[in-house]
Amino acid sequence: MSWDFETDPEFQRELDWISDFVREEIVLVDEILGSPADMRSPLRQRLIPPLQARVKERGLWALHLGPEHGGRGYGQVKLALINEILGATRCGPFIFGCQAPDSGNAELLARFGTDAQKKEYLQPLIDGDICSTFSMTEPAGGADPTSITACAELRGDRWVLSGEKWFASNARFAEFIIAVVVTDPDAAPRNRSSMFLIPREHPGLEIVRNVASVGQPQGDGSHGYLRFVDLELGPERMLGERGQAFAMAQARLGGGRIHHAMRTVGAARRAFDMLCERALSRHTQGSPLAHKQLVQQAIAESWLSLEQFRLLVLRTAWLIDTRGNYESVRGDIAAVKAAMPRVLHDLAGRALQLHGSIGVSDEMPFSRLIIESYQMGLVDGPTEVHQMTLARQVLKNYEASDSLFPAYHLPTLKALALARYGDALAESPPEEPWA
Ligand SMILES: Cc1cc2nc3c(=O)[nH]c(=O)nc-3n(C[C@H](O)[C@H](O)[C@H](O)COP(=O)(O)OP(=O)(O)OC[C@H]3O[C@@H](n4cnc5c(N)ncnc54)[C@H](O)[C@@H]3O)c2cc1C
């Protein structure tokens, strides 16, 4: 029996080093840098690589990857403990070489790429020299991956891509795009699509617009609205097997979702820490906010949801480590993904409220965190879809009853008990069960 909540001292030293490094260096860089994915920014190239070098020197670079690709082969539990520290920052994941979507794209290349594809993209991606994009969502809908319309037609031995893609994060900074398009329209919905590696600035690749999130200038954001116009690719640009994009994406997104959840623990904890500090520091009507019972309730509710969520994330990470794959933990990953937006939303919302007017201002991070909570409810699929997945997985453990009254119907149970304990009841009559 092993059931342990302790961190071994050696690993704790690494966590302490990461916490100090985040506090002393990364939170400051967060305040002065635009996008850490923008390799063409002189400021980015001045600030980020030296910090990455320190992480590499410490042996903490790209920890999601196995030793064959330069990682440490840390399992998901250790990753969870690291990611919850990095998740409180914007640039942290880049500085440790584990940022989305590059980490998932590297996993895809490592697993399905040819030697030539790995040489061209995997190594520079792992080294942190380039950024990448994963593009599946389309303007007409993203929640249903079987509704993809962008397609690739085989002309001779060349693939010709056409169609549009939407919300492709970091497309403007990416050295290559992994695009999911239909290659086999007559196949079953889950076998219709394939993945292609599209090099940056390739003829036929247009960025219609760089869609902005809150805090980014309109039309100058980081989510690419892409158009493929007779975009030609050789067969060597297909990633993995033809028609297998759906299964490959599921494999990729399993890791992506749990890693988002790990980082969300960190973002939510940051809001919680601010909430507590403010409650102790701000006085009104003769006492600190922390002495008001309604504020204590907000703190207690926040602590409970944060700790429950963190345990769910760690348990799911442990299950992935134990079982060695994402597929058999699908329901648990869906649960974590469905829970994450609400936890972040509620904690950031309470922290905002307790900070009063400064809480809603742009001098505090809360409104950004609240928008981020909605983003977390969409990225890698909307919450409702994950709730459906979870419910389907849960229901696999149950069977329908064909009797009019189920076996747990109390009179039915009582009849069974009367039959079983008839001898005892002959001597003393049955009693009414107490509540
Ligand atoms: C910050 C951010 C980054 C992203 N990055 C990428 C990226 O890099 N690459 C990429 O390909 N995509 C990316 N996306 C897109 C994301 O995957 C989609 O937003 C998501 O899959 C939902 O698709 P949609 O936006 O088209 O919403 P729709 O499919 O139009 O769904 C809209 C809403 O309808 C509801 N809904 C949908 N389906 C169901 C259902 N079955 N049951 C009940 N309700 C339902 C949900 O409330 C959902 O939010 C990103 C999104 C965000 C917010």
Image (cartoon, helix red, strand yellow):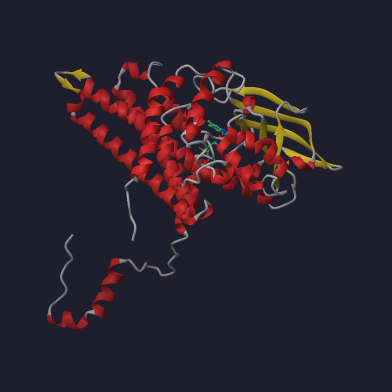
In the image, is residue 211 above or below residue 257? Answer: above
- Judge left or right: residue 400 versus residue 153: left
Q: Nearer the viewer, residue 402 or 376?
A: 376
Q: Nearer the viewer, residue 9 or 98?
A: 9
In the image, is residue 58 above or below residue 154? Answer: above
Residue at image position (24%, 77%) is: 418
- Judge left or right: residue 52 versus residue 237: left
Q: Is residue 389 visible?
A: yes
Q: Position of residue 431 (x, y in %)?
A: 15, 70
Q: Is residue 341 visible?
A: no
Assign ligand 1 to one image quadrant. Answer: top right
- Judge left or right: residue 108 versus residue 20: right
In the image, is residue 203 above or below residue 194? Answer: above
Q: Quadrant of residue 35?
A: top right
Residue at image position (26%, 23%) is: 278
Q: Position of residue 415 (x, y in %)?
A: 27, 75
In the image, is residue 48 above or below residue 244? Answer: above
**How many numbered marks, from 0 up?**
0
Q: Nearer the viewer, residue 181 or 408?
A: 181
Q: Position of residue 29 (x, y in %)?
A: 46, 20
Name the image quarter holding the N terminus: bottom left
Q: Quadrant of residue 44?
A: top right
Name the image quarter holding the C terminus: bottom left
Please identify the residue farthest to the right as the structure is shown.
Answer: 156
Q: Position of residue 88 (x, y in %)?
A: 41, 30
Residue at image position (40%, 68%) is: 404
